[in-house]
Amino acid sequence: MFKRQKSLASERKRGLLSQRATRFILKDDMRNFHFLSKLVLSAGPLKPTPAVKHSKTTHFEIEILDAQTRKQICILDKVTQSSTIHDVKQKFHKACPKWYPSRVGLQLECGGPFLKDCITIQSIASSSIVTLYATDLGQQVSWTTVFLAEYTGPLLIYLLFYLRIPCIYDGKESARRFRHPVVHLACFCHCIHYIRYLLETLFVHKVSAGHTPLKNLIMSCAFYWGFTSWIAYYINHPLYTPPSFGNRQITVSAINFLICEAGNHFINVMLSHPNHTGNNACFPSPNYNPFTWMFFLVSCPNYTYEIGSWISFTVMTQTLPVGIFTLLMSIQMSLWAQKKHKIYLRKFSSYIHRKSAMIPFIL
């Protein structure tokens, strides 16, 4: 009996201890839950995990045909939409090594214009398959080579005539005749003109990295070298007669020539550097340099100064070959100036309102 009561008492104690332990655990859980709830509420609402967007890149298939035979040369696959014609030429060269990128010209249709290297495939594609016609442009040379050859030839050719080599002029006549000072001044001005051209080509102008057919180099050199030979022959001839109005005509023309040369140089330097906004696509505006104020009157002051130099040289030497060369250069530069003027009008109409292309108030 006593043992039974003792066992009942121990069971009651165990029950009380278990109830107390359960209550303690529940209270502890409630405290943890309450603390966790405050922590979550203080952190704010849960942000949803952003969905990962997979960019879809469009690929094109470029079919290249021979422009003459219309036969398929190759197919370039997996060409991205951001690829340019230059990239296509590089891939075309890898697929067909005999087609060099500098010699190949790509067209959308036979007889159409050649596509520039900067054009993207996306801008010309009407479907996922693009057909281009390839043409071999022949031997190509860089533009830097063209300009250097154009300007180095006249510089050296004029000096050969200035030295009066016996194979060009009669030695006895050259030794007997006295050279007028304008002959020396003309040689100086001519050398200054082409030395400036060479230095600007190397250090000022941002020449395009593209190429041009070899025939263009031959034609340009034939024009500049041929006219230089004709001009130098007359000016350095032993029978050359000085200008009609003497030193006054020579001095005024020489001063105007040097002013135009300086103006041309400063305009070229200004055109080759970006403006203050860092964007060289904006129409150039005059600055503190007086030579740049020509921008107030014309769109292409570099052509204005260039024509001014050759007109001054014509008046200073008073020779027919220089006058013909000046006339031809004026016609060509007026065409270039009008073309650029139209581009400026289309892009920057608010900047060049009432401006002329090359000659103030006239052209």
Image (cartoon, rainbow, N blue to C red):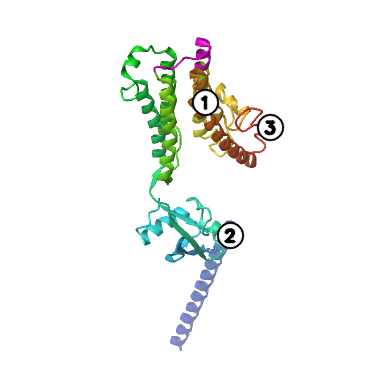
In the rendered image of this protein, does residue 156 appear above or below residue 245?
Answer: below
Residue at x 44% of width, y 30% of height: 227
Quadrant containing the C terminus in the rendered view: top right
Q: Earlier in the sequence, mark 3 or mark 2?
A: 2
Q: Position of residue 135 (x, y in %)?
A: 44, 56
The Cα–Cα distance between marks 1 and 3, rounded to whole angstroms, is 30 Å
Using the image, determine if residue 242 lies above or below residue 2.
Answer: above
Label 3: few (<14), some or many (≥20) within 10 Å?
Answer: few
Q: Position of residue 264 (x, y in %)?
A: 51, 27
Q: Earlier in the sequence, mark 2 or mark 1?
A: 2
- CA–CA distance in space, label 3 to label 2: 73 Å
Against 207, residue 126 (above or below) is below
Q: Nearer the viewer, residue 16 or 124?
A: 124
Name the secondary structure under disc 1.
helix
Mark 2–mark 1 Cα distance, whole angstroms, equals: 95 Å
Q: Can you tell which of label 2 and label 1 is closer to the viewer?
A: 1
Mark 1 or 3: the one toward you: 1
Residue 242 located within the stretch drawn in magenta:
yes
Secondary structure at numbered mark 2: helix
Disc 3 target residue: 354
Question: Where is mark 2, residue-wise?
Answer: 38
Residue 340 counted in the magenta span: no
Residue 266 in view: no
**In the image, is residue 29 above or below residue 190?**
below
Asked which secondary structure carries label 3, the reply is loop
Q: Residue furthest bottom?
A: 1
Tag 1 residue: 323
Determine crowd level at label 2: few under 14, some 14-19, many 20+ residues with C-alpha closer than 10 A.
few
